Image: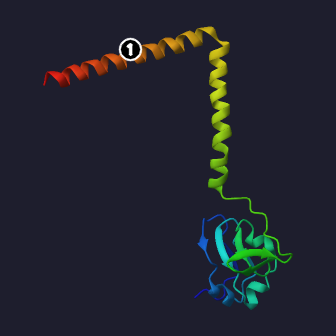
Amino acid sequence: MLRQLKSLDLSFNNLSGAISASMSVLSFLNHLNLSFNSLSGQIPSGSQLQALPDPSIHTGNHDLCGSPLNVNCHNGSGVNKDGEVPYNNGSESERFYTSIGPGFAVGFWAACDALLLNRKWRIGYFCSVDNMIDRLHVWYALNVARIRSC
């Protein structure tokens, strides 16, 4: 229904899946931006989509392949013209999970260093741990005694 559409910007919309083949019938399309989504599969071949040869309109869609990108489509995986798999920055969740370990280590050692270097904090921390253990012991003993009396 939008065959006379001239400009379409769908960047940063978290779109996923393949690009619809019906996009190739938009004969008046002068500007298209599909960057930074999760699009995958082969870019539809058609006269209008091939007339937009700027590969930056597909930036951030690591699973796209076909012309005008330098990634060939076969066997469901993207391989560039040299036969190499293109560099993939990884998804956001992969970066998140790989940063958890170093983040935990830095935070843990920052807390340990604070306890080692500040005597008042160290004494206060271990007194509060002892107090918590004493409270748990009393709570446990009271509950065991209550259960045995029933």
Q: Residue 132's x, y, as percent? A: 42, 18
Q: Nearer the viewer, residue 141 or 9?
A: 141
Residue marked by disc 1: 134
Q: Residue furthest right?
A: 82
Position of residue 126 measured from the top left corner of the image (x, y, whole percent):
52, 14
Q: Residue at x 62, y 82 (%)?
A: 20
**Quadrant holding the N terminus:** bottom right
Q: Residue furthest front?
A: 148
112, 41: nearer the viewer: 112
Asked if residue 8 lies left or right of residue 122, the reply is: right
Furthest residue to the left?
150
In the picture provided, is 130 more to the left or to the right than 118? left
**Residue 11, image quadrant:** bottom right
Question: For the point 73% across and 80% down, which residue is it?
Answer: 73
Q: Quadrant of the C terminus?
A: top left
Residue 75 drawn above or below residue 120: below
Q: Is residue 77 left or right of residue 120?
A: right
> x%, y% of residue 66?
75, 81
**Toward which corner of the image does residue 55 lie, by quadrant?**
bottom right
Residue 2 in view: yes
Image position, residue 61 (x, y; %): 70, 68
From this view, report whether residue 84 is shown above or below residue 91.
below
Q: What color scheme is it?
A: rainbow
Amino acid type assigned to the residue bearing label 1 in the image:
Asp
Label 1: how many Cα within 10 Å (few below 14, some 14–19, many 20+): few
Please tell me whether mark 1 sits on a helix, a strand or a loop: helix
Residue drawn at (42%, 13%) of the image: 131
